[in-house]
Image (tube, helix red, strand yellow):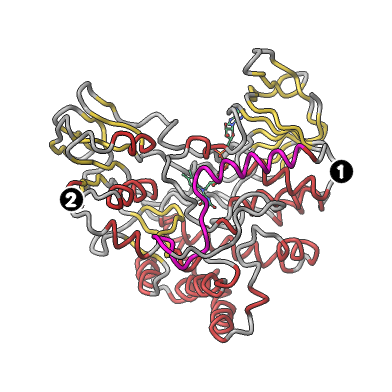
Amino acid sequence: MNTDYLVIGAGATGLAFADALVAEADVEVTVIDRRQAPGGHWLHAYPFIRLHSPSAYYGVNSLALGEDHIDESGENAGYYERARGGEVREYFAEAAARLARTGQVRILTEHEHLGSGTAGEQVRDMNTGVVHDVVARRKVVDARYLEASVPATHTPSFEVSPGARVFPVNELPAAAGSGSSYTVLGSGKTAVDACVWLLDNGVDPDSIRWVRPRDAWFHDRSQFQPLEQVGGIIEGISLDAEAGAQAADLDDLWHRLEASGRLVRIDRSRPATMYRGTMLSPRELRAVRQIETVVRLGRVRRIEADRIVLEHGEVETRSDVLHVDCTALGLRDAPAAPIFQPGRILLQQVRHLSPSFNAALVGAVEARRDDDADKNRLCPPNPYPAGIEDWPRMVRRTWKTEHRWLSEPDLAGWIAESRLNLLGALPAHVTEPPVRTALERYLTHVGPAIERLEQLDGSRRSGPVGTARDPA
Ligand SMILES: Cc1cc2nc3c(=O)[nH]c(=O)nc-3n(C[C@H](O)[C@H](O)[C@H](O)COP(=O)(O)OP(=O)(O)OC[C@H]3O[C@@H](n4cnc5c(N)ncnc54)[C@H](O)[C@@H]3O)c2cc1C
């Protein structure tokens, strides 16, 4: 069982890390996961889920996901394909099988990491119950620090009384039709997906009630299109930089980002505070805006047969109302910690909104550099956003880190070639006038924006609402 690297977690990040590492280093890697197959949370995805971002830059570096075609119809029409849950699961199964065929990687599913023991890392074979001591000759790689939480497997934070009909979003297609109306619980992308699914299946918008503890900001999907449409990405980033450089205060920043089309919210008349970096297409936005019954009384505390008790009040319900749980956290909030540590790698976000890219980048840096301080300089952690207040920190940290990459020719070369780099096609399109204009706007504003966002972030931290989640 001994190995050079022991990767805990065979989700997207554990596999992307292992894939990039063995592409460049002659090492033995063992990837373990307590689930029955590789793919992490995708194994429990709801039936109608799709990636919210294009398949083109998702997954592992060595294997394309999909064929980079542009959808001709449906809510994604005009945009690059986005894999459905089943395709993502098949993709990760294939990625894992290919890794195993290199002879450098061993994938052990139904193996659980219990902790560190005196004789090595303790790994339990869940079929036999035998606990093995595994010595990781180089490093233990924690690919579950940001483990995703999804409705099918999480424990809801509210109680359900007998007689109330509450189920995870995964069961919606099977349960739909067995009630008179629907109450969707949750503020994020999963709740949007549930509402769009209901509307697409002919449910009257007036039969849907939406319990939204917070209103959310989303991105417009058109600004996250790669390859031939990469101009939209640099356009979006340049709008970030312009808004960041010119913002008078945080409210003005959100206003500018919305006015430029960079951020969107479902109800423009309501303040939005939630932000998880997810994207919607204009069609999805139009669809969910038809739902007019929105309950804004905070988080759900308890669902009874005839009422829903929330933080700030209660509303009536009935036993023939189907309550759809979309409240799982999704991305885990975890404090920043050095990614490269003695004997350990703690996978985290580096460039914002690029989980596959980041894990692969850390694998490539591990293969190419010797000194942990240098590796940490190139890959500083950048925690996932819990709310829109995290946007200035997250974006400015990405820009500062990307600037460092540019002065490392070998790494810049790896990034330029990586299929997981959403900006990979930029050089091929840089002579197009709109792309050049956007790039110039970005280059003009990024320096002042970094400074301004640092000031705005500082003002927030010293105020009463500062969370100081990111001490680095
Ligand atoms: C619903 C949803 C949709 C998303 N869509 C996108 C998207 O479209 N585009 C995008 O870029 N990002 C998306 N994300 C972001 C997400 O971070 C990534 O897609 C990615 O799948 C997360 O992978 P992960 O490896 O970090 O975590 P996970 O998938 O949670 O994998 C962690 C693994 O660690 C294993 N594990 C945990 N503890 C142990 C232990 N003690 N021993 C052994 N194994 C253990 C778990 O079983 C799990 O399989 C989405 C996230 C969610 C929740």
* Rendered-image quadrant of the N terminus: top right
Determine which of the numbered discs, if any, sits on residue 293 in the image. Answer: 2
- Amino acid of disc 1: Asp
Residue at disc 1, CB closer than 8 Å to ligand 1: no
Residue at disc 2, CB closer than 8 Å to ligand 1: no
Does residue 30 sit above or below 360 in this rendering?
above
Q: Nearer the viewer, residue 427 or 206?
A: 206
Is residue 183 left or right of 60 when viewed as pictured? Answer: left
- SS for tag 1? loop
> Which residue is most to the right?
26
Does residue 101 sit above or below 365 in this rendering?
above
Residue found 51% across the figure and 72% down from its top:
232
- Residue position for label 1: 26
Is residue 232 left or right of 359 when viewed as pictured? Answer: left
> Which residue is most to the bottom?
433
Q: Nearer the viewer, residue 440 or 449?
A: 440
Any magenta on residue 279?
A: no
Q: Nearer the viewer, residue 42 or 154?
A: 42
